[in-house]
Image (cartoon, grey):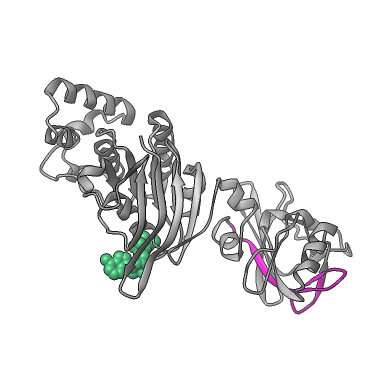
C-alpha cells in the first residue's frame, strides 16, 4: 500500500482547468473521499492517479516514486467505476481470476485468493454466475473483488455505489468501510453525495472548480467550514444562510434586522474584519424553540412542520427565505412562534462567502 502525493497537479482541457494546482497527500491505509459538485474535477484527479489522464503540470508520487508519466499498468492501481466493467462472458470467479492469470499466478495461488475474496465479500453462489444475471449490487461487489484481489498499491473508486438503489447502497457502504479498514488499503473514493462522503471517509476533500476548498475529517468540515460553499455543501437539511448587518454592538439578520445574540469573541472577529455587511449561517439542528419575546430569537412565520420517524422538522420564512429547523423529539404538533439560534454555532461570512475566523 502506498502513500499518494499530488504536487501542484493541474490538468487542462483547452480553456478548462479541470484540475487546478492541487497539492495534497493521502496517507497509507487512509480512506479519502473526493467530494464536490458535478464538473469540479474529481474524476479527472482520479484518472490522473490511475495514469489514464496526463497531468498538464505537477507531479504524482507513490511513496518515494514519481509515477506522473508511467503507464497505468506500471502503477499497480485498481479502479472501479460507476458502471461495472466485468467481462460479460465470464462468470464472477473467472472475472476475479482474470487479472491474476494475466500476470501469471499459479493455480493454487489463484484458488487461495478467490477463497479469500469469497470470505471478505461473501460472494457465495454468485461466483458461478455471469455478471448479466446479477443485480447491480452483486455486480458491483464482484467488481470490487476483482479490483481488490490484485492487492493494488492504491484503490480508486469513482462513484461505485451511485448506480445501486438506495437500500442496497447503505449495505454496500457499510461493507466497503469495513473492508477498507480490514485490508488497510489506501483508498480514494469519488462521490458527489455528501452523506456517502461523511459516512465513509477518514478525510473528506471538498473540491470546487478544480481546486480543493477544504480537506479534513468529516466532523471538521461540518463544524468548521472554511466558507459558505463548504457550509452549504455538507449537512442535511442544509445550513440556513442569510444576509446580515454587522455593527459595533451586534448582528442583525435579513430585511427585518432581527438582532441575534453574539458571543464577545465573535463580535471581536467581526469588528476586526471592518465589515458592515456579510452573511450568517446556522445549521438546522442549532435552532431550538424559544419562548416568546426572548432576545436573539427569530420569528417563525408561515411554518410547515413535518415528521420523519422521530425527527420533526420545521420550515419557516425569514426575509423571504425558507429556513429549516429541527424540533426536539416529542415536541408534538405545536409550532413555536420563535426559534433560538445557538450563539456558539453561528458562522459569519464576508459578502463573498469567506468565513470569518473566530478565536
Ligand atoms: N476529456 C475531456 N475533454 C474535455 N473536457 C473534459 C474532459 N474530461 C473532463 N473535462 C472537463 O473537466 C471538468 C472536470 O470534469 P470531471 O469529469 O473531472 O468532473 P467530476 O467532478 O468528476 O464531475 P461529475 O460529478 O459530473 O462526474 C469539467 O468541466 C469537464 O467538462
Ligand atoms: Mg466524475
278 to 159, vertically: above or below: below
- Residue drawn 27% across and 31% down? 123
Q: Quadrant of the C terminus?
A: bottom right
Q: Position of residue 272 (x, y in %)?
A: 78, 67
132 to 322, vertically: above or below: above
Q: Can residue 299 be seen here?
A: no
- Residue drawn 56% across and 47% down? 218
Q: Position of residue 36 (x, y in %)?
A: 46, 59
Q: Can residue 183 be seen here?
A: yes
Q: Nearer the viewer, residue 344 or 65?
A: 65
Is 13 colored magenta in this rendering? no
Q: Position of residue 33 (x, y in %)?
A: 45, 48
Is 253 colored magenta in this rendering? yes
In the image, the segment drawn in magenta is: 237-258
Quadrant of the rendered image containing residue 260 = bottom right
Left or right, 256 with reference to 131: right
Q: Nearer the viewer, residue 65 or 120?
A: 65
Q: Nearer the viewer, residue 5 or 260?
A: 5
Left or right, 180 with reference to 312: left
In this view, which residue lies farthest toward the bottom? 255
Total label count? 0
Quadrant of the rendered image containing residue 41 = bottom left
Q: Position of residue 106 (x, y in %)?
A: 12, 24
Left or right, 23 with reference to 134: right
Amino acid at each position: 500500500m502506498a502513500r499518494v502525493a499530488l504536487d501542484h497537479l493541474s490538468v487542462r482541457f483547452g480553456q478548462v482547468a479541470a484540475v487546478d494546482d492541487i497539492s495534497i497527500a493521502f496517507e497509507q491505509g487512509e480512506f479519502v473521499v473526493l467530494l464536490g459538485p458535478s464538473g469540479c474535477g474529481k474524476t479527472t484527479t482520479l484518472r490522473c492517479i490511475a495514469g489514464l489522464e496526463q497531468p498538464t503540470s505537477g507531479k504524482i508520487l507513490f511513496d518515494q516514486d514519481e509515477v506522473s508519466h508511467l503507464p497505468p499498468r506500471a502503477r499497480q492501481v485498481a479502479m472501479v467505476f460507476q458502471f461495472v466493467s466485468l467481462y460479460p462472458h465470464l462468470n464472477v470467479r473467472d472475472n476475479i481470476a482474470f487479472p491474476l492469470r494475466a500476470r501469471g499466478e499459479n493455480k493454487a495461488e489463484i484458488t487461495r485468493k478467490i477463497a479469500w475474496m469469497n470470505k471478505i465479500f461473501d460472494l457465495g453462489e454468485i461466483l458461478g454466475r455471469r455478471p448479466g444475471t446479477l443485480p447491480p449490487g452483486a455486480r458491483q461487489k464482484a467488481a470490487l473483488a476483482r479490483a481488490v484481489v490484485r492487492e493494488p498499491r492504491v484503490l480508486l473508486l469513482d462513484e461505485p455505489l451511485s448506480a445501486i438503489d438506495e437500500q442496497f447502497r447503505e449495505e454496500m457502504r457499510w461493507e466497503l468501510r469495513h473492508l477498507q479498514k480490514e485490508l488497510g488499503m489506501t483508498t480514494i473514493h469519488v462521490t458527489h453525495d455528501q452523506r456517502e462522503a461523511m459516512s465513509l471517509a477518514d478525510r473528506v476533500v471538498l473540491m470546487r472548480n478544480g481546486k480543493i476548498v477544504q480537506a479534513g475529517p468529516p466532523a471538521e468540515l461540518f463544524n468548521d467550514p472554511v466558507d459558505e460553499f463548504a457550509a452549504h455543501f455538507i449537512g442535511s437539511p442544509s445550513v440556513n444562510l442569510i444576509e446580515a448587518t454587522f455593527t459595533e454592538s451586534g448582528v442583525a439578520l435579513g430585511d427585518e434586522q432581527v438582532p441575534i445574540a453574539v458571543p464577545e469573541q465573535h463580535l471581536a472577529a467581526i469588528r476586526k474584519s471592518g465589515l458592515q455587511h456579510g452573511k450568517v449561517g446556522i445549521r438546522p439542528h442549532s435552532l431550538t424553540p424559544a419562548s416568546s419575546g426572548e432576545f436573539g430569537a427569530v420569528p417563525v412565520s408561515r411554518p410547515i412542520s413535518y415528521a420523519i420517524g422521530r425527527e420533526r422538522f420545521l420550515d419557516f420564512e425569514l426575509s423571504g427565505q425558507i429556513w429549516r429547523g429541527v424540533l426536539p423529539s416529542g415536541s408534538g404538533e405545536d409550532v413555536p412562534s420563535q426559534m433560538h439560534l445557538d450563539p456558539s454555532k453561528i458562522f459569519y461570512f464576508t459578502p463573498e462567502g469567506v468565513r470569518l475566523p473566530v478565536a
